[in-house]
Image (tube, rainbow, N blue to C red):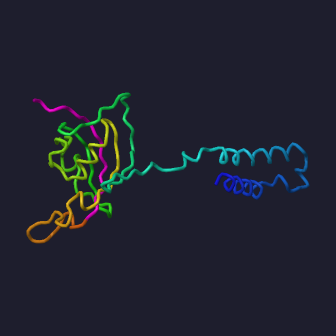
Amino acid sequence: MKSFAAAIALLLCVSSTAAFSVNSGESDRRSFLTKTVASIIPAAIVIAAPQSSLAGPEIITLPSGIKYAVTKEPTDKKPVAPQKGDIVGIDYTGYLANGQIFDATHAGGKQNALLFKIGTGSVIPGLDEMVSQMVVGQKVQAIIPPSLAYGDKGVCLDDGECLIKPGSTLVYDILLKKSSIPPP
């Protein structure tokens, strides 16, 4: 891949510079060198650029089928990971697969984090599992399959209108704000 990028960059440099053409007014050696160096430096930067800087975040797939990418690493040198039974506080935004927001901790006047106890069924299984994989201060974007969200039931009113249709895959932006051991 790197050699292909180098070849493309070289072709672009050669085709975009007039250094190799001879004009009657600018045929001296200084002009030639100036134009050549000016066209080679951008190619050298492209070739030397690490490939990882061009790549997006790594997508991790859990055995349950949840896919996620870390979008912000924690700033704490020794971040805390929640354990089963711990009380956690998260900020989140929940999206349908089409990008429509269905819930958020900061929507409609809400300003508080969602607090819940890990492993008690207080939230959908996919959200519980994802948060248990995180550390305090970490932000992720997670894709939760229907089997770990609302399944075949969805979230529907008695009249049949559904906020979350049955079989919906959900996307969450989650920030784990805090984790603490519950009182005895």
Location of residue 66 (image quadrant):
bottom left
Image x and y of residue 121, in percent: 15, 49
Location of residue 95 (image quadrant):
bottom left
Residue 151 colored magenta?
no
Location of residue 117 (image quadrant):
top left
Image x and y of residue 72, in percent: 39, 41
Frontmost residue, 7 versus 133:
133
Residue beneath the point at 16% across and 66% down: 153
Residue 173 colored magenta?
yes
| Quadrant in which the N terminus appears | bottom right
| Quadrant in which the C terminus appears | top left
Residue beneath the point at 20% across and 40% down: 84
From the image, give the main secondary structure of the stretch colored magenta. Answer: strand
The residue most toward the bottom is 160
Image x and y of residue 159, in percent: 9, 71
Frontmost residue, 43 versus 4:
4
From this view, report whether residue 107 is shown above or below residue 100: above
The residue most toward the left is 158
Frontmost residue, 182 versus 84:
84
Specify whether 35 is left or right of 86.
right
Residue beneath the point at 25% across and 43% down: 91
Frontmost residue, 169 versus 105:
169
Q: How many marks?
A: 0
Image x and y of residue 71, in percent: 39, 45
Residue beneath the point at 36% across and 51% down: 68
From this view, report whether residue 178 is shown above or below residue 18: above
Range of magenta residues: 168-184
From this view, report whether residue 142 is shown above or below residue 116: below
Specify whether 109 is left or right of 12.
left
The residue most toward the front is 63
